[in-house]
Image (spheres, helix red, strand yellow):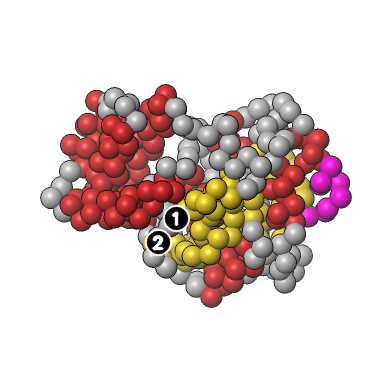
Amino acid sequence: MATPGQPKVSVCVVTYNHEKYIADCLHSVLSQEVDFEFEVLVGDDCSTDSTGAIVDRIAADDPRVHVLRPARNIGVTQNLLVVHNTARAPYIAHLDGDDIAEAGKLAKQAELLDASPGLALCGHKMQVIDEGGRPTGGYYPAHLTETFGLPKMIRCGMPVLASSVMYRAEARTLWVSDFEIFDWYLYTDILKWGMGGFIPEILGGYRVNSTSLTSSLAVAGMQERMLRLYALRYSEAPEFRADFFAWAAFAAWTSFRNRVPITAAHWRFLADTFTPTALGGLGDVGAWILQNRRAMAR
């Protein structure tokens, strides 16, 4: 728990060239009604637009906002780690600079973690919004059990979106990285500590904008980077072999759907992780795709 003078929640906002969205993002956090102290740490990775000026102006008006700006652009992974490593609170929430928090987000997530000491993290449903902040009618995830664990995160990738996650600082062991990580890699680290919880309310907005990863080239690059991360996690946790195979099969299907060639490394990973018990994991992934197919097409 938080000690006197320490915030209970640190909200970590990572941003780069979000001049159209960052004000809405920060105001959505600062307007949260809570009965505890929280801080907002903004990692501005040397934006080349007016993002920095907007962030500085908001920080000047609200002492809860602290700006972290490196001397040079350091990239997504290092920016994320710097911000999260600076957090002082026992509970840490993540928010991308183009997403928003809905009313009640911080209070309800902190309440759940307070009441459930076995939870390492919790997420919530998010509605999909367009560039102007208007709901598109989509939301994610459409269905998720009240609790989920590391096997679910392995099989299905990200059962909750990164900007919906609040976690216990004590659960994280990943502090540095000399390679690019995705949110999945960070949250699989945290789920080694305990279970994940899910709040089935829309407590945030996930923005789809012109920089969304939609091209086949982007899909190919993402699959290749994710495969490296999955292979690393598999070397650390071979007991989840069936779950790793289920993800690899799902990823291969995604590549096929997007007309992206399946690489030799991907075929090797499928062969290395195959086991007859993988059928159960494939069933779960299939159900996941059907339940969330509308949102997954966002």
Mark 2 touches mark 1? (CB < 8 Å): yes
The residue tagged with tag 1: helix, strand or loop? loop
Please name the residue shown 75% across and 52% down the image. 27
Please name the residue shown 81% across and 35% down the image. 53
User: From what the image shows, is residue 140 above or below residue 248?
Assistant: below
* 222 displayed left or right of 110: left
Q: Quadrant of the N terminus?
A: bottom right
Q: Which mark is residue 290?
A: none
Q: Which mark is residue 144?
A: 2
* 138 displayed left or right of 287: right
Residue 191, percent from left and from top: 43, 56
Q: Is residue 275 visible?
A: yes
Please name the residue shown 53% across and 64% down the image. 201
Q: Residue furthest right?
A: 61
Residue 32, percent from left and from top: 71, 62
**In this orientation, which residue lies closer to the viewer: 174 or 210?**
210
What is the three-letter code of the residue carrying label 2? Leu
Magenta range is: 57-64
Residue 54, percent from left and from top: 79, 39
**In this orientation, which residue lies closer to the viewer: 243 or 282?**
282
**In this orientation, which residue lies closer to the viewer: 80 or 128?**
128
* 215 displayed left or right of 202: left
* 112 displayed left or right of 149: right
Residue 77, percent from left and from top: 55, 36
The residue tagged with tag 2: helix, strand or loop? loop
Quarter assignment of residue 91: bottom right
Instruction: Return the residue at label 1.
Output: 141
Q: Residues within 10 Å of mark 2 (few under 14, many from 20)?
A: some
Q: Residue furthest left?
A: 276
Q: Is residue 61 magenta?
A: yes
Q: Is residue 198 magenta?
A: no
What is the three-letter code of the residue carrying label 1? Pro
